[in-house]
Image (cartoon, helix red, strand yellow):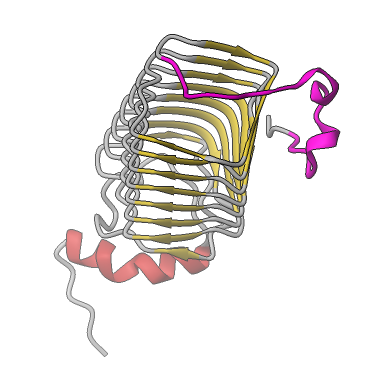
Amino acid sequence: MPLSVPDRLADLPYAHLLSAHTGPLRSDGRYDTVHFDGGEHTDESAGGAAFLECAFTGVSLSGVGLRQARFNEVWAQAGRWVGCDLSESEWQDTAFTGGVLAGVAAHGSALRRTVFRGCKLEAVNLRGAVLRDVVFEDCLLRDVDFGDARLTDVSFPGSTLEEVRLRGAGHTRTDLRGAVRLGLPDGHQGLRGAVISPTQLLELAPQFAHALGITVKD
């Protein structure tokens, strides 16, 4: 079921418990009810770190290593996460709103009950990831790779997909009907099990025809 995403920091159920973070991120660190507000973290190593009921507001992460990190009930707003290693990370009951994820390695990650709202995802590697109850709402996904990923109850309302790869992906109730645009360089590859609209079917018809060896002429 979709995660309800607060619009303001003050609306978080744990807002009154948050304490301000100072200093660099630490490998295997445990951050419980911590507020990361502004600032930039560059080339830091925080592999295996755990973030529980934390908030990120306007935080810039550049080249930060977060391999196998865990994000549980995390709210991130207006952040820029660029060139970060989030491979094999775990996300649950987490929201990323109004931010940018670019050049991010997130292959083999597990995302559950997670919302991306009003975000830009560019050159994000989600190969082999497992996504369950994930919503990409009003997002731009450009050069995002879901190859060999497993998607269950994933939807894209109001989102634009450009150069999004799905080859080898497995779908259970993946709903693409709300997407504004389906830019799929793999064509029909990786769509088995997904739900699309009649209009989207017509847009993809040339790719389906080519795959089946059908020539369409007037």
In front of the other: 217 or 189: 189
Residue 124, image quadrant: top left
Q: Is residue 20 magenta?
A: yes
Q: Which residue does the image show at 29% across and 34% down from the upper left?
A: 127
Q: Residue 21's spot in the image, x, y percent?
A: 63, 24
Q: Which residue does the image show at 32% across and 24% down from the upper left?
A: 108
Q: Describe residue 157's horizontal placement relative to residue 70 as left or right.
A: right
Residue 217, image quadrant: bottom left
| Range of magenta residues | 4-26
Q: Residue 148's spot in the image, x, y percent?
A: 27, 33
Hey, which residue is sitting farthest left in the picture? 213
Q: Describe residue 2's horizontal placement relative to residue 181 as left or right.
A: right
In front of the other: 16 or 144: 16
On-image quarter of the C terminus: bottom left
Residue 94, image quadrant: top right
Q: Is residue 26 above or below residue 198?
A: above
Q: Is residue 4 above or below residue 109?
A: below
Overall secondary structure of the magenta section? loop
Q: Residue 215's spot in the image, x, y percent?
A: 17, 75
Q: Is residue 18 magenta?
A: yes
